Image (cartoon, grey):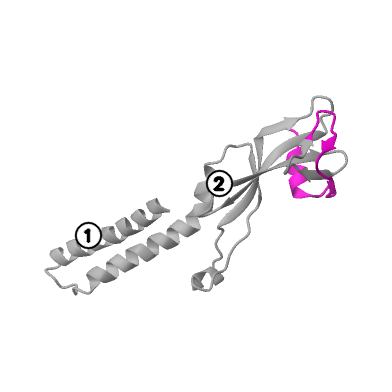
Amino acid sequence: MLMDLIATFAAGGGFVGFVIILRHLTKNRIPKWAIPAAFGLGMLLFSIWNEYSWYGRTTEALPEDVIILSTPTDKVIYRPWTYIFPVSLRFAALDRTGMVTSLEDSGFRRAEVMLVQRWAPTRRVPLAFDCAGARRADLVEGAALAPDGTLSGGAWVDVGPDDELLQAACRKG
Protein backbone atom coordinates (compact mmCIF):
# COMPACT_ATOMS: atom_id res chain seq x y z
CA MET A 1 0.00 0.00 0.00
CA LEU A 2 2.90 2.35 0.72
CA MET A 3 4.30 1.73 -2.76
CA ASP A 4 0.92 2.60 -4.29
CA LEU A 5 0.90 5.88 -2.37
CA ILE A 6 4.42 6.71 -3.51
CA ALA A 7 3.56 5.81 -7.12
CA THR A 8 0.41 7.97 -6.97
CA PHE A 9 2.42 11.00 -5.86
CA ALA A 10 5.07 10.24 -8.50
CA ALA A 11 2.38 10.16 -11.22
CA GLY A 12 1.10 13.53 -10.02
CA GLY A 13 4.65 14.88 -10.06
CA GLY A 14 5.15 13.54 -13.58
CA PHE A 15 2.09 15.40 -14.79
CA VAL A 16 3.34 18.57 -13.08
CA GLY A 17 6.69 18.21 -14.84
CA PHE A 18 4.92 17.83 -18.17
CA VAL A 19 2.85 20.99 -17.57
CA ILE A 20 5.94 22.98 -16.48
CA ILE A 21 7.73 21.97 -19.68
CA LEU A 22 4.67 22.95 -21.73
CA ARG A 23 4.48 26.31 -19.93
CA HIS A 24 8.14 26.92 -20.70
CA LEU A 25 7.79 25.93 -24.37
CA THR A 26 4.68 28.10 -24.83
CA LYS A 27 6.24 31.07 -22.99
CA ASN A 28 3.79 30.84 -20.04
CA ARG A 29 0.60 30.79 -22.14
CA ILE A 30 -0.67 27.94 -19.97
CA PRO A 31 -2.09 29.40 -16.74
CA LYS A 32 -0.37 28.78 -13.39
CA TRP A 33 -3.41 27.00 -11.97
CA ALA A 34 -2.70 24.17 -14.43
CA ILE A 35 0.24 23.06 -12.27
CA PRO A 36 -1.74 21.96 -9.18
CA ALA A 37 -4.56 20.76 -11.46
CA ALA A 38 -2.05 18.53 -13.28
CA PHE A 39 -0.86 17.13 -9.96
CA GLY A 40 -4.41 16.18 -8.97
CA LEU A 41 -5.29 14.83 -12.41
CA GLY A 42 -2.14 12.71 -12.53
CA MET A 43 -2.88 11.21 -9.13
CA LEU A 44 -6.53 10.55 -10.04
CA LEU A 45 -5.71 8.91 -13.38
CA PHE A 46 -3.00 6.74 -11.83
CA SER A 47 -5.33 5.65 -9.02
CA ILE A 48 -8.04 4.65 -11.48
CA TRP A 49 -5.56 2.78 -13.68
CA ASN A 50 -4.08 1.06 -10.62
CA GLU A 51 -7.49 -0.12 -9.39
CA TYR A 52 -8.65 -1.43 -12.76
CA SER A 53 -5.38 -3.14 -13.68
CA TRP A 54 -4.84 -4.80 -10.25
CA TYR A 55 -6.81 -7.95 -11.10
CA GLY A 56 -5.03 -8.54 -14.41
CA ARG A 57 -1.57 -7.86 -12.98
CA THR A 58 -2.22 -10.13 -10.00
CA THR A 59 -3.67 -13.08 -11.93
CA GLU A 60 -0.95 -12.90 -14.59
CA ALA A 61 1.67 -13.32 -11.85
CA LEU A 62 0.10 -16.60 -10.63
CA PRO A 63 1.50 -19.96 -11.76
CA GLU A 64 -0.33 -21.81 -14.57
CA ASP A 65 -1.64 -24.44 -12.12
CA VAL A 66 -3.71 -21.86 -10.24
CA ILE A 67 -7.32 -21.85 -11.44
CA ILE A 68 -9.37 -18.67 -10.96
CA LEU A 69 -12.78 -19.65 -9.57
CA SER A 70 -14.75 -16.49 -8.99
CA THR A 71 -14.17 -12.81 -9.50
CA PRO A 72 -16.90 -10.62 -8.04
CA THR A 73 -17.04 -7.00 -9.12
CA ASP A 74 -17.64 -4.03 -6.86
CA LYS A 75 -19.60 -0.82 -7.23
CA VAL A 76 -18.67 1.84 -4.68
CA ILE A 77 -20.56 5.06 -4.03
CA TYR A 78 -17.44 7.16 -3.42
CA ARG A 79 -16.10 6.01 -6.81
CA PRO A 80 -19.08 6.76 -9.05
CA TRP A 81 -17.39 5.48 -12.23
CA THR A 82 -17.58 1.93 -10.78
CA TYR A 83 -21.33 1.95 -11.45
CA ILE A 84 -20.57 2.20 -15.16
CA PHE A 85 -17.37 0.13 -15.11
CA PRO A 86 -17.38 -2.23 -12.08
CA VAL A 87 -13.96 -3.09 -10.67
CA SER A 88 -12.64 -6.45 -9.41
CA LEU A 89 -10.87 -6.11 -6.08
CA ARG A 90 -10.94 -9.76 -4.96
CA PHE A 91 -11.03 -13.29 -6.31
CA ALA A 92 -10.89 -16.92 -5.25
CA ALA A 93 -8.51 -19.38 -6.86
CA LEU A 94 -7.65 -23.07 -6.47
CA ASP A 95 -3.94 -23.76 -6.05
CA ARG A 96 -3.29 -27.03 -7.90
CA THR A 97 0.49 -26.73 -7.47
CA GLY A 98 0.32 -28.11 -3.95
CA MET A 99 -2.59 -30.51 -4.53
CA VAL A 100 -2.16 -33.89 -2.89
CA THR A 101 -3.88 -36.90 -4.42
CA SER A 102 -4.47 -39.91 -2.20
CA LEU A 103 -2.18 -42.84 -3.04
CA GLU A 104 -4.84 -45.35 -2.04
CA ASP A 105 -7.75 -43.75 -3.90
CA SER A 106 -7.11 -41.07 -6.53
CA GLY A 107 -10.66 -39.76 -6.08
CA PHE A 108 -9.67 -38.09 -2.80
CA ARG A 109 -7.65 -34.91 -3.01
CA ARG A 110 -6.45 -32.13 -0.77
CA ALA A 111 -5.80 -28.60 -2.04
CA GLU A 112 -5.86 -24.99 -0.95
CA VAL A 113 -8.21 -22.26 -2.07
CA MET A 114 -6.63 -18.83 -2.10
CA LEU A 115 -8.82 -15.89 -1.17
CA VAL A 116 -7.06 -12.89 -2.65
CA GLN A 117 -8.22 -9.35 -1.91
CA ARG A 118 -6.65 -6.00 -2.67
CA TRP A 119 -5.21 -4.32 0.45
CA ALA A 120 -5.52 -7.55 2.47
CA PRO A 121 -3.22 -10.53 3.00
CA THR A 122 -4.04 -13.60 0.94
CA ARG A 123 -5.84 -16.26 2.95
CA ARG A 124 -5.37 -19.94 2.17
CA VAL A 125 -8.15 -22.37 3.08
CA PRO A 126 -7.26 -26.09 2.94
CA LEU A 127 -10.02 -28.29 1.51
CA ALA A 128 -10.56 -32.00 0.95
CA PHE A 129 -12.36 -33.29 -2.13
CA ASP A 130 -14.19 -36.55 -2.82
CA CYS A 131 -14.36 -36.53 -6.61
CA ALA A 132 -16.47 -39.67 -6.92
CA GLY A 133 -18.94 -38.64 -4.21
CA ALA A 134 -19.14 -34.96 -5.32
CA ARG A 135 -18.30 -33.75 -1.80
CA ARG A 136 -15.84 -31.42 -0.19
CA ALA A 137 -14.79 -30.58 3.36
CA ASP A 138 -12.98 -27.72 5.03
CA LEU A 139 -9.76 -28.89 6.65
CA VAL A 140 -9.81 -26.39 9.51
CA GLU A 141 -9.62 -26.69 13.28
CA GLY A 142 -7.76 -30.01 13.24
CA ALA A 143 -9.71 -31.71 10.43
CA ALA A 144 -7.58 -34.08 8.35
CA LEU A 145 -7.94 -36.35 5.34
CA ALA A 146 -6.37 -39.80 5.66
CA PRO A 147 -4.82 -41.51 2.59
CA ASP A 148 -7.78 -43.91 2.40
CA GLY A 149 -10.24 -40.99 2.17
CA THR A 150 -11.36 -41.04 5.78
CA LEU A 151 -12.12 -37.58 7.09
CA SER A 152 -11.47 -36.91 10.76
CA GLY A 153 -12.47 -33.80 12.67
CA GLY A 154 -14.61 -32.40 9.87
CA ALA A 155 -17.73 -33.06 7.85
CA TRP A 156 -18.28 -33.69 4.16
CA VAL A 157 -20.62 -31.31 2.34
CA ASP A 158 -22.47 -32.56 -0.73
CA VAL A 159 -21.88 -30.00 -3.48
CA GLY A 160 -22.93 -31.90 -6.58
CA PRO A 161 -20.91 -32.64 -9.70
CA ASP A 162 -21.55 -29.17 -11.19
CA ASP A 163 -19.71 -27.34 -8.40
CA GLU A 164 -17.02 -25.17 -9.98
CA LEU A 165 -14.54 -25.74 -7.14
CA LEU A 166 -15.02 -29.53 -7.23
CA GLN A 167 -14.60 -29.59 -11.01
CA ALA A 168 -11.36 -27.60 -10.78
CA ALA A 169 -9.95 -29.88 -8.08
CA CYS A 170 -10.97 -33.13 -9.76
CA ARG A 171 -9.90 -32.15 -13.26
CA LYS A 172 -7.22 -34.36 -14.69
CA GLY A 173 -3.92 -32.89 -15.80
User: Element type at marker 2?
Assistant: helix
Vertical relation: 131 (above or below) 147: below
Residue furthest to the right in view is 133
| Labelled pair 2, 1 in contact (Cβ < 8 Å) | no
Residue 96 visible in the snapshot: yes
* Residue at the image point whose x is 85% and y is 44% from the top: 134
| Amino acid beneath label 1 | Gly
Residue furthest to the left in view is 27
Percent position (x, y) of residue 136? 80, 44
The stretch drawn in magenta includes residue 140: no
* Residue at the image point whose x is 18% and y is 73% from the top: 32
Q: In this view, does 166 lie to the left or right of 25?
A: right
Q: Which of 97 and 172 is in front in this view?
A: 97
* Residue at the image point whose x is 70% and y is 38% from the top: 111
The residue under label 2 is 59
Sooner in the amino-acid sequence: mark 2 or mark 1: 1
* Residue at the image point whose x is 79% and y is 28% from the top: 102
The stretch drawn in magenta includes residue 153: yes
Q: In which quarter of the image is residue 144?
A: top right
Give the residues drawn in magenta, as a range: 145-173
Q: How crowded is mark 1: few (under 14 residues within 10 Å), some or many (20 or more)?
A: some
The residue under label 1 is 17
| Amino acid beneath label 2 | Thr
